[in-house]
Amino acid sequence: MCGIVAYIGAKQARPLLIEGLKRLEYRGYDSAGIAVLNGAVSVVRTVGRVSVLEDRLAESGDLKGSVGIAHTRWATHGEPAERNAHPHVDDRHGIALIHNGIIENYAALRTWLEEQGHTFTSETDTEVLTMLISELYDGDLEKAVQGALREVTGAYALAAICEKEPDTLVVARKGSPLMVGVGADEYIVASDASAIVAHTSRAVTLDDYQVCKLTRDSFRTSTLDNVAVTPRIQELELELEQIELGDYPHYMIKEIFEQPNSLRNTMRGRIDLREGRVVLGGVGQYARELVKARRFILLGQGTALHAAMIGEYLLEDLAKVPAEVEYSSEFRYRNPIIEEGTVIIAVSQSGETADTLSALHEAKERGALALGVVNVVGSSIARDTDAGVYLRVGPEIGVASTKAFTGQLSVLTLLSLFIARRRFMSVEQSSEILRTMERIPEMVERVLAESDQIRAVTERYCDRENWLFLGRGYNYPTALEGALKLKEISYIHAEGMPAAEMKHGPIALINHGMPVVFIANKGAQYEKVMSNIEEVRSRGGRVIAVATEGDTDIKRYAEDVFYIPEIPEALSPLLAVVPLQLMAYHAAVIRGHDVDKPRNLAKSVTVE
Ligand code: G6P
């Protein structure tokens, strides 16, 4: 969502803050701003990307000072406009604030603050929080922040400075991530480790309702009631090169091509072929509960939801246990029934998606055992679940999720086998599936080698504004994911659906030349998919098929074919999604869009 970076130390803050903002820009990017202390508080804010802010700074001269805060925003309250961009500055003491999250009771607070004589210049909840801190300020910024946060409901990660306290930076968190990088006589605070790792590998992750006061050479963490908390400094696992582009033009294509390796990492040490067993340290202590579980509910949003949908098939098909899947945003508000033996699985790359986090809290409150299938280590969902399995795919920067999706599928397959093998699955059957899984990275490499051909085909169709993606069984969710990828970054309207559903309405859309992508690999429903292809062709649709290597017959039905290696159906989405990722990527590049920062999107959505 929005990105926060703040600095206090001996160096000039501005270049450091701008570099940090660039690293965080993938989280949200409709406006940006910076405030630096140098006697007074100097603020520069702009609509648009961090590069626009940089240009403005070059025009307005240097912002000198070694204490500062900076922000990149994804609008929630108020349109993307300079007056709504952060930092916000109060009207009395020279307090500047940046904030991620949402202050839910901002309207009531604003009315009260107006009665106290404060004048607002924006529509944001953040300005309300700034004025509240200002109202409570009596010469101690830490105390004023603690007092203000006792009054607000909602979520926040924030950083504040005040011109009356030139050697102080105060930060706090509840429900939105924030970590304090601990360098040699300097501190870099950020909402994401990627803005810290170039400076130090030591960091403290703040817990909810914690405040941290930093001076140039020391820091103290406390609760909102000012009770001191002993901070735990941890080593960041992130390497700088993992978040650099290297030779790739975009993070998305880098991450698509990383999949053979990211999948190897996901599986490493987790497969015991001899016993046909899966070793998952993170859920080991709950093995009995998982084996006895009566029902699984998988929750997620966006790409994570599509992985969860495939997880539903996997759990029922391999582990033979009832499973259902739901948008986490819907789950919480429909009064869900959680019976004894219900296990929920929260699927999330970032581990910060507010909808999924709230759903998880709801399920836990109702007594469910909660597992996480999460990528970001130490994220809110990872921390709030009872147990979980990390994806280990490394940082995903491209807004369109790719390697996290295949990581989620691998983990959900491993988890299903973990349960299946303990319930009834034979060593032979389990070992056979695991042996195939071990070959998947090499199979993905073969699909990636087709990237140029996929680009050439995409080029022929990418001026069409309406596409359909169709699949059946395990590859119905893959079709949804293919459509999501295309619309997210190329702004082409695309719909995914079960192939058989097409004839119940959407077939009316098919006209001459409409691209229809079929996932038509060899499987139980192959013949039926062929009939669906015929239905499209006879109405003038142009069929692009993802098919199994060796299937030459399909060329009679489809205009263009992308081949994937032969693989059992349960594992086929791991391969079938790759040409769809590549197609979406190439379409966006050909149409001239900013692939890594598509309009209106944010990598991690930390508001409900
Ligand atoms: C946002 C992103 C999507 C992502 C979804 C869930 O909408 O733009 O790409 O799939 O959030 O994110 P999560 O971090 O929970 O997987």
Image (cartoon, rainbow, N blue to C red):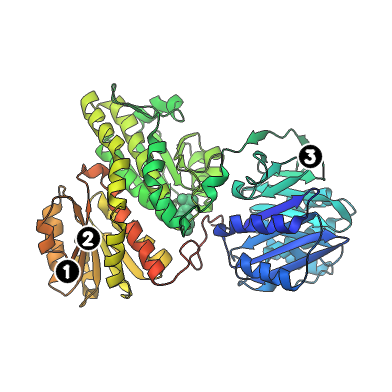
Tag 1: amino acid:
Val
Measured from the top left, where is residue 261 in percent x and y? 39, 41
Q: Secondary structure at mark 2?
A: strand
Q: Closer to the N terminus: mark 1 or mark 2?
A: 2
| Residue 518's disc number | 2
The answer to whether any part of residue 239 appears in the image is: yes
Location of mark 1 (residue): 536
Image position of 428 with respect to 138: above or below = above
Give the residue at x 50% y 52%.
246
**Which quadrant of the figure contains the N terminus?**
bottom right
Image position of 112 with respect to 23: above or below = below
Q: Closer to the N terminus: mark 3 or mark 1?
A: 3
Location of mark 3 (residue): 220
Give the residue at x 83% y 67%.
91
The answer to which quarter of the image holds residue 483 is bottom left
Give the residue at x 45% y 27%.
281
Tag 3: amino acid:
Arg
The answer to whether any part of residue 102 appears in the image is: no
Q: Secondary structure at mark 3?
A: strand
Q: Are marks 1 and 2 in contact (CB under 8 Å)?
A: yes
Left-right relation of 406 to 157: left
Label 1 neighbour load within 10 Å: few <14, some 14-19, many 20+: many
